[in-house]
Image (spheres, rainbow, N blue to C red):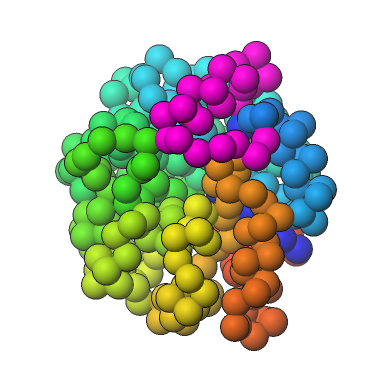
């Protein structure tokens, strides 16, 4: 089974506009049209069994609308995390609602949502996420479409880990896009998942393999950042790495099955 832990889609009514805006902002092409149906087409071509959508509320008022959509699209092949904007006032009620609907986690994007990952003001929100047995996935490192400062550095994430020991946390983009030395210094070997999204073009196979082995193959989750990553190429990249077949199987699906509490 292959599970893509990190994808993006939008409601059909806004997908075309959202893709156009984000493509221009990041200066990168999109490999789907941003709809769930086109993601499924991409999954079929790539032999991916399940994709997890990672939505982002960039404004507090978007939180409920996005989460209701996220709940509505879930089926056997498409799952979704929820989103909480830090300035959304009813975050506790919303997190509990998402948990009651079977949502497995919350996606945070500190750059788009304008908060530093280790700001103590966010800790009550994190605590509520973890107390409801949910995962927190953070965009980590540089976002190529946004200016500095970087709001989620590897050091900042380590501070969160020290506060919430044992919590299930995923650092997207191999722990911190374009901050690889800091990832190795502060996060490699820690109790945190890395996802592989949007890194195959930035890390050669030797560096990627060394980081995976040093961190532990049981803590790596396959992700593509679709539509910004080509799912088929990303699957092929993981399969091409000089790892044992059982290690590739863990990365491509088995680790996600365990983290998400799915049936294999």
| Residue 120 highlighted magenta (yes or no) | no
Is residue 223 shown above or below 125?
A: below
Q: Quadrant of the C terminus?
A: bottom right
Q: Quadrant of residue 158?
A: bottom left
| Residue at the (29%, 60%) spot, across then down | 179
The kind of secondary structure the magenta stretch mainly shows is helix
Is residue 229 shown left or right of residue 49?
left
Of residues 119 and 210, the one drawn nearer to the viewer in this rendering? 210
Is residue 227 shown above or below 24?
A: below
Q: Quadrant of residue 123?
A: top left
Where's residue 46, x and y in %? 76, 54
Where's residue 101, x and y in %? 61, 34
| Residue at the (65%, 39%) spot, across then down | 31
Is residue 33 shown left or right of residue 153?
right
| Residue at the (50%, 45%) spot, across then down | 105
| Residue at the (51%, 68%) spot, across then down | 220
Of residues 232 and 95, the one drawn nearer to the viewer in this rendering? 232
Is residue 237 shown left or right of residue 189?
right
Residue 212 appears in the figure: no
Of residues 213 and 240, the one drawn nearer to the viewer in this rendering? 240
Where's residue 258, x and y in %? 61, 64
Q: Which residues fall within the magenta stretch?
A: 10-32
Q: How many discs mark residues in the rendered view?
A: 0
Is residue 20 shown above or below 202?
A: above
Residue 140 appears in the figure: yes
Q: Quadrant of the N terminus?
A: bottom right
| Residue 11 highlighted magenta (yes or no) | yes
Q: Quadrant of residue 29?
A: top right
Where's residue 217, x and y in %? 52, 77
């Amino acid at each position: 089974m292959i599970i893509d832990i990190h994808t993006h889609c939008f409601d059909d009514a806004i997908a075309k506009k959202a893709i156009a805006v984000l493509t221009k902002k990041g200066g990168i092409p999109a490999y789907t049209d941003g709809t769930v149906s086109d993601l499924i087409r991409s999954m079929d071509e790539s032999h991916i069994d399940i994709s997890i959508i990672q939505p982002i509320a960039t404004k507090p008022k978007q939180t409920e609308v996005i989460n209701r959509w996220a709940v509505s699209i879930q089926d056997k092949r498409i799952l979704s995390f929820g989103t909480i904007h830090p300035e959304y006032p009813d975050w506790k009620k919303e997190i509990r609602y998402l948990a009651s609907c079977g949502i497995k986690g919350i996606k945070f994007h500190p750059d788009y949502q304008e908060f530093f990952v280790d700001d103590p003001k966010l800790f009550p929100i994190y605590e509520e996420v973890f107390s409801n047995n949910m995962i927190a996935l953070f965009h980590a490192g540089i976002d190529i479409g946004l200016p500095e400062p970087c709001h989620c550095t590897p050091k900042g994430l380590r501070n969160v880990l020290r506060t919430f020991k044992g919590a299930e946390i995923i650092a997207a983009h191999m722990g911190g896009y374009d901050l690889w030395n800091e990832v190795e210094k502060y996060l490699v070997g820690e109790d945190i998942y890395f996802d592989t999204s949007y890194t195959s073009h930035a890390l050669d196979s030797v560096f990627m393999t060394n980081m995976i082995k040093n961190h532990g193959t049981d803590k790596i989750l396959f992700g593509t950042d679709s539509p910004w990553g080509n799912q088929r190429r990303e699957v092929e990249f993981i399969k091409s790495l000089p790892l044992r077949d059982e290690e590739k199987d863990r990365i491509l699906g088995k680790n996600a099955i365990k983290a998400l509490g799915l049936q294999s």
